Amino acid sequence: MYMSMQDVLEQIRSLLKKKKRGRISAISREIPQEVLKKQNSKQENEAQSSTGQRAQGQGSEARNSLGQKFGGQSIGVQNTEGHSAVAPETVEQSLARQEQIKADQSEESNTAARSEGQNTETRSTRQNIETRSAGRSAESNTAAHREGQNTAEHSAEGQSGIERAKDNMTEYRGGNVMRVIPVYNMMVLPHSYIYFQVQSFKNIAGQEIRQDDHVLLAVLKEDSFNTKDLRKEEFHSVAVEGSVTEISGDGYVVVRTGQRVKILELAQKEGEPLLLETAPLSDIEDLDREDSERKLKEIKAELKTLVDRFRAGSIMQTMIDQYGSIQEVACILSPWLSLKNEERYQVLKEDRLSVRTKMLEQILYEYVEVTKVTSDARNQQQEDYQKLYKEQALQKQIDYLQKELDEMHPEKVSDLRKLELKIEESGMNEIAKKEASKILNRLKNEGTNGQEAGMLYDYMDFVTGLSWKKEEQKSIDLDEAEKILSEDHFGLKKVKERMIQQIAVMNLKKQQSGSILLFVGAPGTGKTSIGKSIAKALGRKYVRVSLGGVRDEADIRGHRRTYLGAMPGRIMDGIHKAGVSNPVMVLDEVDKLSSSYNGDPAAALLEVLDPEQNNTFTDHYMNVPYDLSDVLFICTANTTDSIPAPLLNRMEVIQYQGYTPREKFEIGKRHLMKKALKNVGLQPENVELSDEALESIISDYTREGGVRGLKKRLDTLCRIAAVHLVRGKGEKITVGKEDLQEYLDMNPLHHRAVEEKGRAGVVTGLAWTAVGGEILFIETLATKGEGKLTITGQLGNVMKESAQIAISLVKSMFPEKASFFKENDLHIHVPDGATPKDGPSAGVTLTVALSSLVTGQAVCPQIAMTGEVSLEGKVNPIGGLPEKLMAAERAGVKTVLIPKANVDDLRDVPEEVKDKLEIRPVENVDEALEICGIEKGEEVSTENKSEE
C-alpha cells in the first residue's frame, strides 16, 4: 500500500489530535507586555553599548538562530488577565547549537564558534549568580553590579516597565522569556526537531505564538497535573530547552531543542507566580563520530527500504536524507513508537551518547521490523478486501443483469431462481435465511436429477411459502365486531363479551396479547363455528386444525427430514395454508388427543400454546424458529377431564352451556333454516315451516344440548321440498306439526318424563352428559334376605361409593329400622342400564330414595334433586347445574333441590328456565327429607345428632 505525502501529513495531524502518544500542556501563559518591552529596550541598549560588553548583539542573533542553549533561572509572574506568566531571565546564547545549522548559514556558525569560549564563561558566571543559596560568591556580586550598570543606562520608559514588573513579583532576576511546556509520552531529545499542532500549542502555551519563543519541555511523571498548583515532584528531573523555529502554514509549530537541563526548583501555588530554576546538563561525548555517522546511515537505509512499500516512498526518502542524527530520527518517529512514558524518559536521562545511541538504535530497528510486519499484514488484508469488493461488484452486476432478463422473459425464470427471489423477498429471520440458502445451494449442486432433489425442493417450496413478515395491527371497531359476532350466533353472551375484551386490549397494545381460549361445551353449541366469526370480526384469516385422534408428537411438531416422506406438523401446515403470520387458528377437539409410543402430542402443544415460548416455535421439519406469538389460538373441547393439567393451565376455560328450547327456536329460525335452504338451492318462499312444527322438532325429534340434531332435521325437510319442487308438484311446501313424522320418517324420541304419581323407593335425579343435562330415576327395592346389597346400571366407582354412604347415613337416621337392613336384601338400580354413569352428584338422591324405601313414604315425581352427601349428612356442591336445570324443565319437573353452595351458579341459568322451576337450596339431608315429605323422629335427626 502506497501513501502520498499528504496522507503522511494527515496521519501526523490525526495522531496529534488524538494525543495517543504524547500530551502537551501549558504551565506558563501569556507574557506581560511590560516585561517584553523592557527586554527589547535592554537588548537595544546593549547593542549600542561598547564592544567590551559581553553578549553584545547576541539577543538579536538568538531570535534568528535555529538552535540555542539556555540556562539559569526563571521566576513566574502574574499578568493583568490573571494568567500565569514567566518573568524574563538572563540567557547566554551557546554556539554549540549553531554547529548544526545548514551549510548556507556557515558564516554565522563560524562567528558563533569564535565566541564560544567567551559565551561559555559568561553562562557559567550567570548560572552562579542566580544560585538560590543564602551566601552568594563575589563573582555573583560582580555580575549583579554589572547588570545594574546596564539597567541604569535604559530609558525612562524601560525603567518604568521594570519597576512595574517588580511590583508583580516576589523576586526578580534577569533572563530570557521562557514558556514551560509539560509533555507526556513523547520522545524529547536534545538537538532535534519536535512538531506540535498550532491550535493545540496556542491553547497550552498562550494566546499568541511567535517565532523564536523560548520553551522548556518538562517530562511529566503522570498524565495529569493542575496548572494552578505545580510541584517539582510531578516532573522528572531532566528536561530539554528549545525555541520555536517555524510556524508553518500547514498548521504545525516546529520546536528546535537545545541542551538538556536539570530542574532544580519548580513550584507554583494558586495566586502566586511560577518559580523555576534549572542547571545545564552536558552529554558525555563517548561516541566515535565515524561510528555515529555509520549507524545513522544504516538506520536511514532501513527507513528508506521501509518507505519503499508506500506510495510516496521517493518523497519520504528525500525527507529521510535530511535527518542529521539518530536523536532527530527518534523525535520525528515519536508518535509511532510503542514506548511507555518512563521508557522514553530513560533515553532522555542517559548522559552517555554511546548508550543513548544504542538505546535509540534498538528502538528504531524494532519499529522498522514491526512496521514491516504490520505493512505486510495490511497489504494482505487490502488484497483480500479488494478481491471481496471485486467479487461483490461482479455479483451485483450479475444480479442486475439477471433481474433485467427475468423482467423481459418471466416465463423463462427457472425454479431455482424463483426460490432465490422468494428467499430475498420473504423477510425471514437470519437463522431461517441461512438454512434456506444452504438448502438452496445443495439443491443447485445436486441438480434437478439428484437423489434428494425432490425432498429439498419440497422443503424450499414450503419454507418460502410461509409468511415471515409481521402483519400490521389494525384498529378494530368494537361495535362493528360485536355486530359481526351477533350476526352468525344467537346467545353466547359470555363468549362475545370475552372476545370484545380481547379486541379492546389489542387495540390499546397494538399487538396480539392475552391467554389462549378454550371453549368447553356440548357438541353443536357453536364452539368451532364462532371461530369463523371471531376471525371475521378481527379481519384475519381463519384456519381450523382437527386434533381428534392424534396420537403422534410429529403431528404437532412435524417429522424430521431424515425420514422418507417427512412432512411439517399440523400447526405450521395451517400457517402455510393461511398465507399470513397472524391467522385465527382453531385447535378442535383437544380433549380427544391420545398418547402412544410415538410420544405425547399434548406435551408438544405446551410450547405452541404458551405465549412466553411460542415466539420461537421450531418445527422438526423446518428446523428453524418461527414466531407464533401473533396467532390467535382458540381450542375447543367437550370436557376438560381428559386434558392434561399442564396444558389446561395454559388456557382460559370458557364454558358453553346447552341451549334452551327458546334459544334453539331462535337459532333454527334465524340461521339454520336459511343455511339449509341455501345448501339445497331453495328460496325462503319455497318452504313454509310453522312455529309449532319447529318447536315440535326441537322437543320431540332432537335430544341434545346443542343444535346439530336440529340442523339435520331441517336439512331433511329442505331436501324433501327440493324433490317436491323438481317433480313439479308445486313451488311451495308447507310443513306442519302433523307432517313431521311423515317427512322426517321417524317416530318422536321418547323423552324420559316424570310420572304423575310416585311410589316408595323411587326418586327423580339430575345428571350431566356430554350432550347436555338429563333426568334419571333412582330405583330401590327391598327383598327378603340377609342384608346383601346389589347395585346395577353400569355405575362407576364414585357412584357406588355414594350408594354406600347413603346406606350408612340412612341407617344412622333410622336406627329403629336396623332389623329392616338385616332381614332384607337391597337392590339399587339406575336406568338406562346400557349407559355408563358416574359422579358424586347422585348422593342426596340415593339417600332420599333409601329413606323413602325404609319408611314406605313416596316422594312426588315432580321433585328432582342433585348434590353430593357426606357422612355428616351435609349436601356438597356439584357441577353442570345449568344443564341439569334445563333437563328438569324439559322433563316437566316443578321443584328442584340444589346444594346451597351452588346458588351463585344460578346466574348462568337462563331466566326462562328459572321462571318455570321452583329452585330450593338445601344445606343438609334433613332439609331435603322435609321438602320431600319424609318424616322421622326428631330425636334421630342428623341435626340433633350433631348437637349431641
Image (cartoon, grey):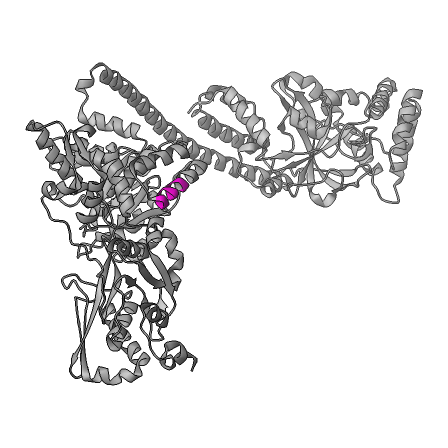
Query: Is residue 878 among the parts visible in the rendering?
Result: no
Q: Nearer the viewer, residue 215 or 234?
A: 234
Q: Is residue 650 above or below residue 852?
A: above
Q: Nearer the viewer, residue 222 or 226?
A: 226
Left or right side of 51 for 510: left
Left or right side of 713 for 244: right
How many numbered tags mark residues here? 0
Q: Nearer the viewer, residue 12 or 757?
A: 757
Tell me residue 943's x, y (percent). 40, 76
Residue extending farthest top: 408
Q: Is residue 172 above or below residue 811?
A: above
Q: Toward which corner of the image does residue 260 lie, by quadrant?
A: top right
Residue extending farthest front: 757
Q: Quadrant of the C terminus?
A: bottom left
Any magenta on residue 113? no
In the image, which residues are magenta?
493-501
Q: Quadrant of the N terminus?
A: top left
Q: Toward which corner of the image does residue 236 lie, by quadrant?
A: top right
Q: Residue, x 19% and y 31% (percent of image)? A: 678
Q: Residue, x 20% and y 15% (percent of image)? A: 409
Q: Nearer the viewer, residue 14 or 913?
A: 913
Left or right side of 112 for 465: left
Q: Residue, x 81% and y 28% (percent of image)? A: 81
Tell me residue 218's x, y (percent). 69, 37
Query: Is residue 104 among the parts visible in the rendering?
Result: yes
Q: Toward which corner of the image does residue 45 lie, by quadrant?
A: top right
Tell me residue 462's x, y (percent). 21, 35
Most prominent secondary structure in the magenta stretch? helix
Tell me residue 405's x, y (percent). 23, 16
